[in-house]
Image (cartoon, grey):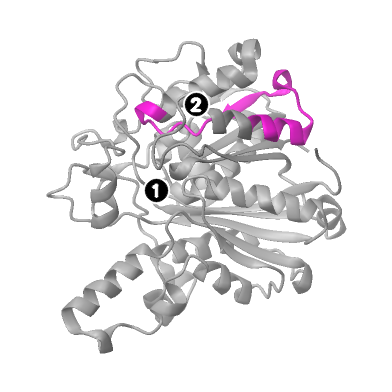
Amino acid sequence: MSAGRRAVITAIGAVTPCGLDAESTWDAVVSGRSGIRAFEHVDVSDLAVSVGGEVRNFDPLAFVSRSDAKRLDAHALYAIAAAHEAMSGVEPLNPDRFGVTVATGSGAVSLTQEAVRTLDRSGPRRVPPGVVVYGGPDAAAAYLSQKYDARGASAGLSATCASGTAALGEALRAVRHGYADAILVVGADDCLNRVNLAVNSSLGALAPGYESAPSQASRPFDRARRGFVMSAGAAALLVESDEHARRRGAVALGEIAGYGVSSDAHHPTAPHPHGRGAISAMRGALDDARVTPESVDHVNAHGTGTPLNDAMEAYALQHVFGDALASIPVTSTKSTTGHLLGAAGTLEAALSLLGMRDGAIPPTINLDDPEFPELDVVAHEARSERVSTLVTNSFGFGGHNASLVLRAV
């Protein structure tokens, strides 16, 4: 149960297929403008998948030196850019009480794959030595801790698609129990390369086709859904204790009130069919926040658009919320952004906070034939509604599950 200091979010940043900052991303999402396009920078001519959420018109030199732009993996560059937005205007924090966590499902996969190609093509002497530093899942965290003089704990956290939500939950615990005053949490991933697209296509996880209608590919909770749409990007949130934020005059966007985390212990890729882990995570978050199901105003679903995940999540939501579910709007912003993998949870938390700020619940686009009538899925257009308390979910391969309760302040 919750105890100790309150944890609030005071700043956000984002780099996504829908925009190069948080506000432009939110504007696209709440307006139902998809960021999914035909691939421009990946050769998918022989792959089953043809569309995805690429970050477009991104200039890393606005955030890092030319040499660092060459050394760092794309996911780390997105993380640095999102962190730059979140930290803009923030005065230097007490370095010994300030930490950094970067959540990522896969880390520097493109950098590592290119190093293997260089080794095969040109031999060991041509492999850049920087791969040992910049090729790990902690690379962006190490970079950001140095950039912002954060001398508290810095680490990479990986729990596949639950990474971002788990990182925010762990930040809540660290702040609540006094281990830190502030933690910069960034979720970042870029698996838009031939290897990762091929593997996920072979698993049947990705939506095939849609060459002529890319924006229709991501279809959470729709009967015609065929898989998720992979995207790249990052989102950053500054988590602080409430007293620390007030002391420095920061305005809180919302509070992380509760966190639940679990493992299915069931299957490498398929969720537990009866949502065992998802139910546990949601109930844990509600209990931690001391919130009843009837008090929840909105659920930001994991909602990937895969047949198994959406069915499992619908079942789990019914199990957790019971009769109250009929009056709780449910939405999946992955319908517009695609699935940012390890960054999904941080992005969706940021979008949830902006929705609370603006009194708007973003739509689930492409929901033309709902499969789960028991869910009040906000279809096609945003809904004007005041949200004070919401649940946001992230579930991933490996049976990782994490849920947060976010609350207005």
Residue at left offset 74%, top offset 60%: 182
* Along the line of sight, the residue nearer the viewer: 186 or 139: 139
**Label 1: few (<14), some (14–19) or many (≥20) C-alpha neighbours in 10 Å:** many
Q: Does the rendering let one see residue 20? A: no
Q: Is residue 23 visible?
A: yes
Outermost residue to the left: 46
Q: Which residue is mark 1?
A: 17
The location of residue 282, given as percent across then percent down, is: 63, 31
Above/below status of 16 relative to 97: above
Front one among 354 and 164: 164
> Which residues make up the magenta segment?
282-308
Q: On the rendered structure, is 54 left or right of 3?
A: left
Left or right of 242, for residue 356: left
The C terminus - image quarter: top right
* Circle on res. 203: none
Q: Residues within 10 Å of mark 2 (few under 14, many from 20)?
A: many
Give the side of residue 404 with respect to residue 189, left or right. right
User: In the picture, residue 255 is in which quadrant?
Assistant: top right
The residue under the point 37% across, 54% down is 55
Vertical placement of residue 370 versus 393, above or below: above
Residue 257 position in % (x across, y down): 75, 39
Distance from Cα at disc 1 to Cα at disc 2: 25 Å
In this rendered view, identify the residue nearer to me: 257 or 11.
Answer: 257
Inspect the image, locate mark 1, and give the three-letter code of the amino acid beneath it: Pro
Residue 360 on the magenta segment: no
Question: Where 313 falls versus 355 (above or below)?
Answer: above
Residue occupied by mark 2: 313
Q: Secondary structure at mark 1?
A: loop
The local secondary structure at tag 2 comes to: helix
Can you say whether 219 is above or below 157 in the image?
above
